[in-house]
Amino acid sequence: MVGRGVKAAERGAALTHRLLAFSRKQTLLPTTIDLNLLISDMADMLRRTLGETIDVVTIETENLWLCVADQPQLENALLNLSINARDAMPRGGRLKIEAANISLPDEVAAKRADVDPGDYVVLIVSDTGCGIAEDTLGHVFEPFFTTKDVGKGSGLGLSMVYGFAKQSGGAAVITSTLGDGTEVKLYLPVWAGHGEEIADNQSIAEIPRSQGERVLVVEDDDEVRAFAVSLLSDVGYDTVEADTAQTALTVLDRTGAIDLVLSDVVLPGAMNGPDLMAEFRRRVPAIKIIYMTGYAEQAFDHTGELEEGTRLIQKPFKKTDFANAIRETLDEV
């Protein structure tokens, strides 16, 4: 009962977050971003998440301007658009991701994108899927509007992308032809600074790396699990994964040497995250533990306190913060 209550609270928190994104009231922390680098960093994770039937093509643009946006939210937007594209290609197809510099010098040019005149970096995501009918296209950014079957989507993914783009000072534009694919463009404001370094979260050299450890990722959401595994693999960790507590225990028995467990707080079945970690600690007392959750830390238990030797990180997480949490936990004595 407690597990279902926390899961419902997490869904409520996610719903509130998406509605705030649409209404442009969420808190954003913009930094300077090289979109070429962001696309490159996410490419492998997207290939794992979308599956073998989707050909993910990324194109690097020469002399691309830096843009200004909240990086975790931009990564979430790209993931959202990519998943929508996959769902529009049930028999497989091509997903193309690229960026471009675009100048909209006057009101006439800017009006087409519903954005102020100026310079923008545009993230372009296009697919070869089933496309969207003309009478439907005008509604896709509305909250709760979805073309998917009941239970297959919340109808908030594209509205969140739209709200994020508008709050960032840009725009989201979608074009589609029924039977011939869809293209979404996210207009993001250009960085106006000169002679300054790119934000720290773009510096690969500063991201702490593995020292040969193995991490077990326990998460029932396939996309979140793939994203976490991708981030861990990018910085050198050996990873194993499980989608339920029982599978995680089987993995531990089979592989033996696990240095750290990264687990969702709420898991399907009889055992939640803390129950699973108690069993892990019974078998391997010195094992390191990190919980990940999309809800507030106070929802973790009735005291709001974590057990000794554990850490909690909030979803969504960005690469540097995530890697730091992993490294710091493993280095604790």
Image: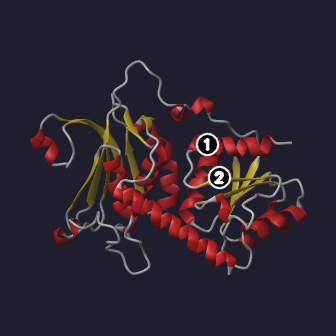
Query: Which residue is the site of mark 1?
Result: 321
Query: Which residue is the site of mark 2?
Result: 313
Q: Is residue 292 left or right of residue 155?
A: right
Q: Is residue 205 above or below residue 132?
A: above
Q: Amino acid at mark 2?
A: Ile
- Image point 41% across, 72% down: which residue? 154
- Image point 72% across, 41% down: which residue? 327
Q: Is residue 237 above or below residue 277?
A: above
User: Residue 74's spot in the image, x, y percent?
Assistant: 42, 48
Sequence order check, earlier mark of 1 and 2: 2
- Image point 37% across, 20% down: which residue? 194
Q: Is residue 59 left or right of residue 243?
A: left
User: Residue 119's spot in the image, x, y percent?
Assistant: 24, 34
| CB-based contact (under 8 Å), mark 1 and mark 2 | yes
Q: CA distance from mark 1 to mark 2?
A: 9 Å
The image quarter containing residue 64 is top left
Q: How many numbered discs, if any?
A: 2
Q: Is residue 156 left or right of residue 219?
A: left
Q: Amino acid at mark 1?
A: Asp
Mark 2 secondary-structure assignment: strand
